[in-house]
């Protein structure tokens, strides 16, 4: 029994050394954002907020551009796609969501609650950060 334990330990050590060799063989990638390493926590929060505001402005600009493009091209052109000399293809896609009446929404909620109680449904949680200005 004692020798079996030693053999098991050696097997683990051998496996760990193999893992270490594999990890050592993976080339390190250059940090794409080296400037962040020198920022304090407050500076990181301010930078994140700055990026968040830039993304919001960019999204608003994208929506204006989309409106302009929708006015410029027909539904058929957008549905089948328009190829440009720059190698880009502009096309319109659709995603359908459903809005239910109160009775159906209540029935769906009841089914969901029962599935949760019965264990045939499980949580899928997404976590994200949010920054809110306090002033």
Image (tube, grey):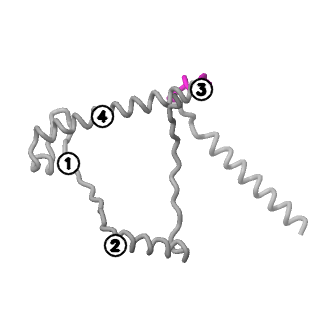
Q: Crowding near pointer 3: few (<14 within 10 Å), some, many (20+)?
A: few
Please report whichever mark, 4 or 1, sits nearer to the chain's N-terminal start: 4
Q: Crowding near pointer 1: few (<14 within 10 Å), some, many (20+)?
A: few
Please say if the residues under marks 3 and 4 sit with CB atoms less than 8 Å apart: no
Mark 3, residue position: 42
Q: Horizontally, is 15 left or right of 56 in the view?
A: right
Please report whichever mark, 2 or 4, sits nearer to the chain's N-terminal start: 4
Mark 4, residue position: 60
At which x and y percent is residue 13?
77, 52
Please report whichever mark, 2 or 3, sits nearer to the chain's N-terminal start: 3
Q: Is residue 35 magenta?
A: yes
Please report whichever mark, 1 or 3, sits nearer to the chain's N-terminal start: 3
Mark 1, residue position: 92
Please say if the residues under marks 1 and 3 sit with CB atoms less than 8 Å apart: no
Please report whichever mark, 1 or 2, sits nearer to the chain's N-terminal start: 1
Q: Splitting the image into 4 quarters, where does residue 74 fall?
A: top left
Front residue of 27/116: it is 116
Q: Crowding near pointer 4: few (<14 within 10 Å), some, many (20+)?
A: few
Mark 2, residue position: 103
Q: Quadrant of the N terminus?
A: bottom right
């Amino acid at each position: 029994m004692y020798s079996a334990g030693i053999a098991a330990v050696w097997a683990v050590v051998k496996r760990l050394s193999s893992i270490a060799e594999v990890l050592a063989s993976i080339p390190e990638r250059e940090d794409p954002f080296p400037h962040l390493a020198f920022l304090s926590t407050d500076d990181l929060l301010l930078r994140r907020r700055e990026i968040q505001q830039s993304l919001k402005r960019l999204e608003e600009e994208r929506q204006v551009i989309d409106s302009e493009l929708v006015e410029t091209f027909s539904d058929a052109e957008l549905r089948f796609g328009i190829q440009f000399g720059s190698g880009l293809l502009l096309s319109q896609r659709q995603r359908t969501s459903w809005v239910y009446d109160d009775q159906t929404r209540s029935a769906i909620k009841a089914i969901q609650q029962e599935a949760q109680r019965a264990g045939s449904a499980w949580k899928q949680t997404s976590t994200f950060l949010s920054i809110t200005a306090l002033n």
